Amino acid sequence: MRLTTGTNTRSNPRKRRIAKRLVAATAALGFSALGVWGTTGSAAVAADQASVSESVPRVPAKQAGDVTIADNAFSPAVLEVTVGTVVTWTNQDSEPHTVTSQGEGPMNSGELGRGQAYSQTFTEPGTYTYHCTLHPGMHGEIVVRPR
């Protein structure tokens, strides 16, 4: 049994544009997470950085915030916690990574080898963006809410 809607992307220019945008956005996010663009950067990576909180579902914290570093990505990319939460990043990749605040901020893990962890307690509400200094395509965000 085959379900059809009466039009497909070939005969519908609007659906074709939407499909192209979806493919481009998916590719940009995937390549960014893999660090494919390296340190040279691109408009797509910059757009990805600016829209991390808009494009990635927010994950509420359980008791503490845990972020896994694997496959050249922070998971979850956006984590919501409350004031006083300790967030711990654990590197499960075979290569080293860092957890470093964008601009001014509290996070500065230094290099984390496989199996190493870094923890940060968030005492003030706000949005804290961070990246890996060794892999500029890796970005994350901690959103700290009042209790």
Image (cartoon, grey):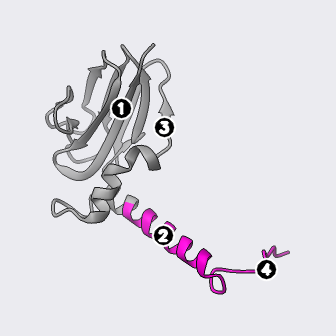
| Residue annotated with mark 2 | 21
Task: Please state which amino acid type lies under the numbered disc 1.
Answer: Ile
**Nearer to me, 12 or 112:** 12
| Residue annotated with mark 1 | 142
Which residues, given as a range, are shown in magenta?
A: 1-28
Q: Earlier in the sequence, mark 4 or mark 3?
A: 4
| Residue annotated with mark 4 | 6
Disc 2 versus disc 4: distance between alpha carbons? 22 Å
Q: Earlier in the sequence, mark 1 or mark 3?
A: 3
Residue in the image at 31% along x and 17% along y: 124
SS type, badge 3:
loop
Residue in the image at 42% along x and 16% along y: 146
Residue count near mark 2 (Cα–Cα under 10 Å), binned few <14, some 14–19, many ≥20:
few
Residue 43 position in % (x across, y down): 27, 64
**Nearer to me, 90 or 114:** 90
| Residue annotated with mark 3 | 58
Tag in front: 2 or 1: 2
Residue count near mark 4 (Cα–Cα under 10 Å), binned few <14, some 14–19, many ≥20:
few
Disc 2 versus disc 1: distance between alpha carbons? 27 Å
SS type, badge 4:
loop
SS type, badge 1:
strand
Q: Are marks 2 and 3 in contact (CB under 8 Å)?
A: no
Q: Earlier in the sequence, mark 4 or mark 1?
A: 4
Task: Please state which amino acid type lies under the numbered disc 3.
Answer: Arg
User: Which quadrant, please, contains the N terminus?
Assistant: bottom right
Residue in the image at 21% along x and 39% along y: 102
User: Which quadrant, please, contains the C terminus?
Assistant: top left
Disc 4 versus disc 1: distance between alpha carbons? 44 Å
Residue count near mark 1 (Cα–Cα under 10 Å), binned few <14, some 14–19, many ≥20:
many
